[in-house]
Amino acid sequence: MFQKTKEENDMNCPLCGEELEHEDYFGRIAAHQDGYIAGDIWRCPNGFKQNGSCDSELFHVAGSFYTYRDNDKLHEGYPC
């Protein structure tokens, strides 16, 4: 997993350099839960294209990265 912070990475894809797009957030956000937001989901637009322009297209959820709000480190893949 990539361990760069948002400041070090400037929210660019560590694989191709394209600016990451904020896609969603994750946490305990279902109606019956307490609403805690654990982190944010980011997507590389090149990885989502599936055209060979970024190796993140090989991730289980293509082009996905995520950060936890309490430590700000960029991780590769989709949060479980």
Image (cartoon, grey):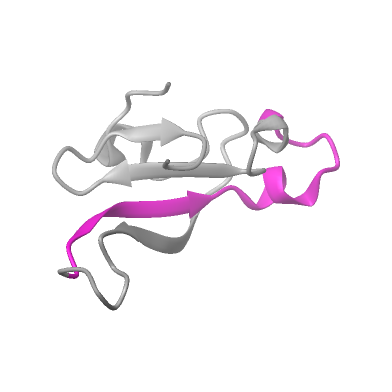
The residue depicted at 43 percent of the width and 64 percent of the height is 24
The answer to whether residue 40 is visible is: yes
The residue depicted at 65 percent of the width and 53 percent of the height is 45
- Quadrant (top left/top right/bottom left/bottom right) for the C terminus: top left
Up the image or down, 15 lies above or below 46; here it is above
18 and 71: which is toward the camera:
71
- Quadrant (top left/top right/bottom left/bottom right) for the N terminus: top left
List the single residue furthest toward the bottom.
31
Q: Based on the displayed image, in which of its 4 quarters is residue 11 positioned? A: top left
The residue depicted at 40 percent of the width and 44 percent of the height is 66
- Locate residue 56, reporting x and y percent: 65, 34
Q: What range is drawn magenta here?
A: 35-55
Q: Based on the displayed image, in which of its 4 quarters is residue 31 positioned? A: bottom left
The answer to whether residue 20 is visible is: no
45 and 36: which is toward the camera:
36
Position of 23 compared to 29: left or right?
Answer: right
Number of callouts: 0
Position of 61 compared to 22: left or right?
Answer: right
